[in-house]
Amino acid sequence: MSIVTVQLGQCGNQIGHEVFNAICSDVHGTHGLCSKKENESYHDACQERFFCEEESEVPVARAVLVDMEPKVISQTLSMAARSGYWKYDDRSHFCQKQGSGNNWANGYSVHGPRHKEVIMNLVQKEAEKCDRLGGFFTIMSMAGGTGSGLGAYVTQCLRDAFPTSFILNHVIWPYGTGEIIVQNYNSVLTLSHLYQSSDALLVHENDVIHKICAQLMNIKQISFRDVNQVIAHQLGSVFQPTYTAEGGLHYSRNPLGDLMETLVPHPEFKMLGLRNIPQMPENSLAYSTFSWPGLIKHLRQMLIANAKMEEGIDWQVRPPRLGSSIPSSHSTNKPLQFNTSIANLVILRGKDMHSIDLGSFRDPSLYTSWLNPQDAFNAWKTPRAFNKYEKSASLVSNSQFLLKPLDNVVGKAWNMFASKAYIHQYTKFGIEEEDFLDSFTALEQVICSYTIL
Amino acid sequence: LSLSLPFAVGQCGNQVGCRFWDLALREHAAVNKKGIYDEALSSFFRNVDTRSGGDGPDIYKGKICSLKARALLIDMEEGVVNEILQGPLRDVFDSKQLITDVSGSGNNWAVGHKLYGYQYRENIVEKLRKAAEHCDCLQCFFIIHSMGGGTGSGLGTFVLNLLEDEFPEVYRFVTSVYPSGEDDVITSPYNTVLAMKELNEHADCVLPIENESLFDIVNKIHQMINSGKLGSTVKQNSLVTSSAGSAKTVQEKPFDAMNNIVANLLLNLTSSARFEGSLNMDLNEISMNLVPFPRLHYLVSSLTPLYTLADVNVPSRRLDQMFSDAFSREHQLIQADPKHSLYLACALLVRGNVQVSDLRRNIERLKPSLHFVSWNQEGWKTGLCSVPPVGHSHSLLSLANNTCVKPTFIELKDRFMKLYKKKAHLHHYLHIDGMEQSCFSEAISSLSDLIEEYSELDATKGGPRTDPSRLKIAV
């Protein structure tokens, strides 16, 4: 089954481009470290999932590019074509001239309805090119005006037009110390609306990725390109082909569906975090060796201690003892820093899989009580190494990972809302104070739900 | 092609405008080596086929034939505009973009606004519509004018009103040169306050500029160059005050250096809309992020660096210095000290080889010494444009919505009241059709209200921070 990617706004288009780059370079790399047959299966599965073989010499990404100003799309299209390994369909993009002015209301209430038909036509065309449509993957930032506002509107349209397809929104959380002054308003409006139409939100925080670039990748002058490449690597590690069943003979055909099934048992809980190890500069790879027990141990501790990367993990955090006194409304017996999970998915890529023991992830004390531990945890694997890492492990987690960031964003937005600052900019385009209140209410509900896990 | 349409009104406006077009051409020539008419150029220039003589059709792609500025030049005297039309930029404008008269406005806002406004309304609307027709998508209007005189101030604000009536959805940015205390036009306080009311009510964003600040910067640069303190020579074309490398070869006039600063301000302001970058910042984003309440739309600007040394190697210490300078009193384009006042919002537009980590490092470093209003503690809007200005490897434009504009407005009010209490020169205004005493009282009232709004915000500075309690959800 194929995934159609919708790239929205500057951020969405810049990241989307890096994602296809990462996937392509992984597939063409000679570091698969597996049998030729395995490599070919992997290649074919990846092709079907992300690319279309048209009459052109290079594979064409299954993507729709949308932006309200022309510069980024034009750059993205030409950079892709220059790579020589893949390209975008020249007709599969839509842009306007004047941008959304970082105004969510402009993106959602003005651009959305105005351009709905054209955009959905492009999406329909891409969907029809797929033999079997596996769902939609949208990439957007929540801080700006287009990705966030128009993105929320488009997601709604996708849901209306494709009621049975899976929709996964990849959402970029902006830097805490501002890229955009009204970013918290835009974020609150985006998240509350996406929650209604999306199946799940997969989140990347700029601050976190920035730290990874600085501390793990040793990059001195970090550019957005660097940040986007780390994000693309992490996404690739999730979406490249894997075997989802033990002893499976074929690469999974339905990655989005599988993801939703394993991670989103309840519609109130849609926030997914992503961790990937190891991460290091390319030229260090040759000198490093990894062991599965080591990687798994680190990944597990990153999960329970809510660590953003493999350095600076707090090893003191331990899961609570089961059978302790039953909490009233809040889980007071759990240590405060402990990250409770609803469901987890671990993805392992590389050789020597047979020795792996994932029992530590099946420990019931990691999870809330409402799912069976065997249902709460899943593992996908492939012996084919990813993107030059001999062994790599990823964790996609529906847990309290994003509770604190969400609470922060809502808090700051509320603080600003109380003074009514900037509200006139939104009411100008049809988003009223009531709409803000609805969004705040919806998110406070999500925060509450995740808090009492 | 998302476009801006500048209006230069009055003597000051046109002199600055002239420098702006000249430096814009210089900037695009430096970037556009192949002579192809590209999207960046199209934001300020049309490409016209003049081979058959006269004004041919617009050419949208391909080689540059003849560039025509998208602009309207308005002046009620002919001197400045005639000079432009005889100078090296004569081919950049055509007569359809000009509106001139002969006798001037006599430094009288009422003459500019009421008399000429009424007289030229239709003419202006017609030319405006024509100019807008050539634009695929109009994003914003720029008005460049001075506040102290008659034409720029009066007719300029008349045009502002007109723009709101005819194109209500297009943003209106105004670059206003405020008169200094020793201005030789006695009635400049009247003109300025009358114009301020219009700016309060009809502008989306105002960038106030004070001649004193421009003058100080020009002096500072002269001193730097002549003192021999600098180890190496300064790159001539990098001076924020310089016309080097532009079309202007005639000896520089006294105001040229100062006007170049303002021209550079406008170039930097629009750079991210014209050129690519990793984090674009359009003009409508500036308005959105920097104007938390409709009337508080006065933005203090600063440009750094003022020059570059001819040294090729620029240590990152210099880069950080550029950020520090942006907040120093000496670099602001009005007499103000933002560091000791209250920030409502701040925008940083960086050009050149600067990455997000440089930006963040400097924001973290400078933040503790700045005071932000309680509901906007992390109120930063940032943009990264890959193309630096001519002669620089990187540059920074900072725009601050900061209560430090208040002293400027208070002084203005004081100067106004000094004249008004004695009813000095009022008769020159009141005998113009449409002018009444109430125009004055409303104008000063509007200014007083504005000052009051800033004062209320100032009062919150340094006070205890109590965050409003969050919504409670039933579990």
Image: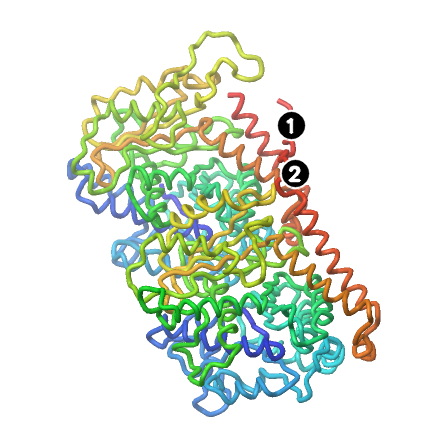
The foreground one among A429 and B244 is B244
Is A319 placed above or below A70 here?
Answer: above
**Which amino acid lies under the numbered mark 2 shown in the image of this protein?**
Leu
Helix, strand or loop under label 2:
helix
Occupied quadrant, residue B50: bottom left
Considering every residue shown, the one lying at the far bottom of the view is B53
**Which amino acid lies under the numbered mark 1 shown in the image of this protein?**
Lys
Q: Chain of mark 2?
A: A
Is B224 placed above or below B10 here?
Answer: above
Q: Position of residue B139 (x, y in %)?
A: 56, 65
Please indicate whether residue B96 sits to the left or right of residue A94 in the image.
Answer: right
Is B18 placed above or below A14 here?
Answer: below
Is B211 placed above or below B88 here?
Answer: above
The foreground one among A31 and A425 is A425
Q: Position of residue B16 (x, y in %)?
A: 54, 75
Q: Residue tagged by mark 1?
A: B472
Please indicate whether residue A368 sits to the left or right of residue A448 in the image.
Answer: left
Q: Chain of mark 1?
A: B
Q: Residue tagged by mark 2?
A: A437
Total residue callouts: 2
Helix, strand or loop under label 1:
loop
Label 2 crowd (10 A; few <14 / some 14-19 / many >=20): some
Label 1 crowd (10 A; few <14 / some 14-19 / many >=20): few
Q: CA distance from mark 1 to mark 2?
A: 12 Å
Q: Which mark is residue A373?
A: none
Color encoding of the figure: rainbow
Q: What residue do we see at 52% from left, 47% from top?
A: A148
Q: Position of residue B296 (x, y in %)?
A: 65, 55
The foreground one among B441 and A164 is B441
Instruction: Work out whether residue B344 can be spotted.
Output: no
